[in-house]
Each structure stands twice: as C-alpha cells, then as structure tokens.
Amino acid sequence: MYERSSVAELAKSLRQELNRYSPGGKLPSSRVLVERYRVSPVTVSRALAQLAAEGLVVTRPGAGAFRAQPRTDAADAAPGDTSWQEVSLSADGAIELVPRSVDASGVLVTLAAQPPGVIEFNSGYLHASLQPERAMAAALARAGRRPGAWGRPPVDGVPELREWFARGIGGAVTAAEVLIAAGGQSALTTTLRALAPPGAPVLVESPTYPGMLAIARAAGLRPVPVPVDSDGVRTDLLAAAFKATGARVFVCQPLFQNPTGAVLSAERRPEVLRIAREAGAFVVEDDFVRRLVHDDAGPLPRPLATDDHDGVVVHVCSLTKATSPSFRVSALAARGPVLERLRAIQVVESFFVPRPLQEAAVELVGSPAWPRHLRSVAAELRARREAMTAALRLNLPELALPHVPTGGYHLWLRLPDGADEGALVSAALRAGVAIAPGRPYFSAEPTAGYVRLSFAGVAGVAEIGEGVRRLRSAGEGLLGR
C-alpha cells in the first residue's frame, strides 16, 4: 500500500484483520502500521479514529489502539427502546402559535465589552490570563499543516473529535452518535428546533440560562418554569409540569447549574429520566462546565446520558467555556431517530463546523498542554471563588449566598426583600463594576431579586476584592443599610 492510499482503504484493511486479535488485544503500534502499509502517520491516525468511531477499536493516548471489548452490559443484552420517539417527534398537535419575540438582553450582558476600568463580574468566559492561548495557537498551527485540513469535513464532524467527545460522555455513547456543532449555543438552537414545533411548551429550570430562554422564544416555544433547589430540579414539580402542559422537552443543566450552581442529586437523577420517559419526552442535558470543575470538588457525577439507554437524553457539551469565546466547538449526542433529525437541521443551518477549527480541537485536546491547562484552571477558579465568597461575607453580608458551588465560574446572590435589582445593577456600573441582573434568568415572575457575579472574567484575586468594595459602595442606601 503506497502513501497515496486513502484512509478508507487502510481502515478497510485493518477492519478485515481485527479478528486476529482477542477483545482487548493491542493492535500493532502506529509506527509498525506506517511501515507495514507504507502510509503516513496521519493516515494511520485517521484510519484508527474511523474504526474507533465505528466502535471496533478503542484508542488510549500514550498506550495505543486495542480491539474493542464486546459490550456485555444490560443495555446490550436488551437494547433500549427508542420507538417512543416516533410518537414524540410527530405529536405536533393543534398548538396555538406564539410570537417569536427575541430578548437578547440577558445574553448581551455577558458579551458586551465594558469601558476601560470597569471590573467585569458579568462575564461568561475565562479571562485572557486563564485561557490556553499558547496551546491553542500551537494547535491551530499544527492543524493547518495537516493534510486536507482546509478541505470539506465530514458533515457529522472529524472522526477523531467525535471519538474524543464520546469518551468524555462516559462510554455510553459511541462516536457514531455524536455530531460536532459550532458551540453550545448553536447546539442548543439545533436541538430545540429539532424537538419541538413552534407554539409548543418546553420545560426549563427556574432560574435558568437566559441564552436558552432566548433560543426557545426565538423558535416560538413557550418556556414553562420548573423550580430548582440545592439538589437540582424539583422532580415532584417536574412530573406535575409534564402532566399539566403535555410538554415533550425538558432542558436542564444537572452539573453546576447556571445560575444557582446546584448539582442534581443522586436520588433525583434516575427520577428525571423515569419521569421524562413516562411522559414520552426528551431531556436536553446541557453539560456546559464539566471542564471547569474546581480542584476541591471531588468526584463528579456522570452525565445523565451515561445512564440513558432509551434515547431520552440529548447531550450537549462544549470546549468553549474551558478555552476561549472564539473556540466554538461543541458536540451533540443522541440515539434513535432523533439523531437524524438533529443532523438534518444542523446541515440546513450551518453545513458543518470549519475543518481547521475541528482539527485544531483534535490537536489541542490530544496535547500534553490540555490536562495541564485544566489543572491550572481548576486551582485558579477555586482560589477566585474563595476570594469572592470571603469578600462578600465581609463587605456585603446583606447579600444571601444560598449555595457555594465547587465548579463553574459564578455565584448566585439573593438581594434583601424590597431591594431594587435594576437600581443596584445601574449603581454598580457607575461605581465601575459590571454585574448581571437576576431577572433575565427567570421565564416567569422571579421569586425575589438576584444578581449573578462571575469570578472567571477578571484579572485575578486582587481585582475581585476591589470589585466587591465598589459593589459595597454602590449598594449604599439600596440594600437596606
């Protein structure tokens, strides 16, 4: 086999030879395959990624490629039943259409550039000092030199990247069930368009991410709030909401929920899946900050998708939060007929994610710099969280902090009864600190006044202290002091 041989040809040859190896057996090294088939290392890497995407081999960085073990868990012995999706995906019914009004104010708060000197407690992204800029630049340079890097990518995404995301979901999803999307916001837009017709209700956590509410309303959907407490969504109210509305979609953030920081409890996790399955509904799992865990968090719960065998969960995750606002690479994972609908809508909306960006993502997450970056960010976010909570308790004890998360990048604070949320936000900006108002996080009437303070978008601990002092000054006369 000569250098010009295609990845497909090498994958075919390797596929035919897999029976020579026992399950779990190690395949020849990449160097041996290069010499045996007279191809480039890139061709070998892509061929192995293709087999991994098919579930035939498992690749382990630093260890090599191995023949995949036959799946023997209960899900394989009795495959999950996704036939219910045919009813849910077709049950549009006679739904009264609602206006497709779009209020992007809750999103723009976290995206707007602030004047010089303003401390940004409203940011939704890592400060430049926390971003892996050198590693991203190196990855992009290497990606640009890859053969075919500027060609048209596979519609579903580059196989190596799909395989990497599938492993991150916990092994319950194969690479064949993953689509690469252009950031979490785009992935959520595709998902809601795929799952619900205009005018339909969609259940959302309350409070929840304003960007998701904007997506739903832009699609003509009716967000219906389901309250969240310190253990995540209230499952008793979730069941009641499905029954009352006939909704077929529930959007949630089980891990470090935005804005409360809550983690869905172990007791409620199976309940969410059971309730949705009985309602013939989908759960959209927005796993947006799994890679922004703090270094004192302890073991994380697995994604909901890991425990779902019946195609209830549509999983969304992204690299953007842990890298840069411009590194817009994410993944959609689903099984059953809904996967084809997601694929079709994504193709219509965007064709595909640019290949150089996908190749750069493959280079980045496969480099030694990636785990070092995540460890560094985990330590820094913990230090910033501790600095902000200490400063708030000292300077602004009037602001209630019901939950201190061990992941994510912000705190959710309740104002004293009667405090004017809008007036505080305006006064804070005049004092030189930008904060996010709580109102946009509610799809209906808010239960109280809130603000969200981010500790990720500032230069460091010293700036956090100064920002809280400015906020204390702004709160004079507004917080009952």
Image (cartoon, rainbow, N blue to C red):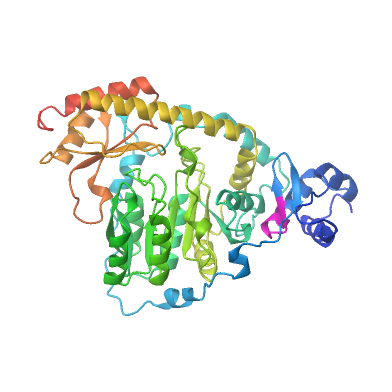
Name the residue nearer the viewer: 429 or 228. Answer: 228
- Looking at the image, residue 35 sits to the left or right of residue 334; the answer is right
Image spot of residue 17 (x, y percent): 84, 59
Q: Is residue 30 magenta?
A: no
Q: What residue is shown at x 70% (from left), y 61% (from top)?
A: 70
Q: Is residue 116 visible?
A: no
Image spot of residue 176 (x, y percent): 62, 61
Image spot of residue 222 (x, y percent): 29, 64
Name the residue nearer the viewer: 361 or 172. Answer: 172
Name the residue nearer the viewer: 157 or 50. Answer: 50
Q: Is residue 52 magenta?
A: yes
Q: What residue is shown at x 27% (from left), y 75% (from top)?
A: 96
How many marks are shown on the rendered structure?
A: 0
The residue range painted magenta reads: 49-58
The quadrant the N terminus occupies is bottom right
- Image quarter of residue 118: top left
Q: Is residue 92 above or below residue 285?
A: below
Q: What residue is shown at x 58% (from left), y 61% (from top)?
A: 177
- Looking at the image, residue 347 sits to the left or right of residue 114; the answer is right
Image spot of residue 93 (x, y percent): 34, 79
Task: Give the farthest residue toward the bottom.
Answer: 94
Q: Is residue 25 visible?
A: yes
The quadrant the C terminus occupies is top left
Q: What residue is shown at x 71% (from left), y 43% (from top)?
A: 146
Q: Is residue 143 above or below residue 287?
A: above
- Looking at the image, residue 109 sits to the left or right of residue 457; the answer is left
Q: Is residue 188 above or below residue 263?
A: below
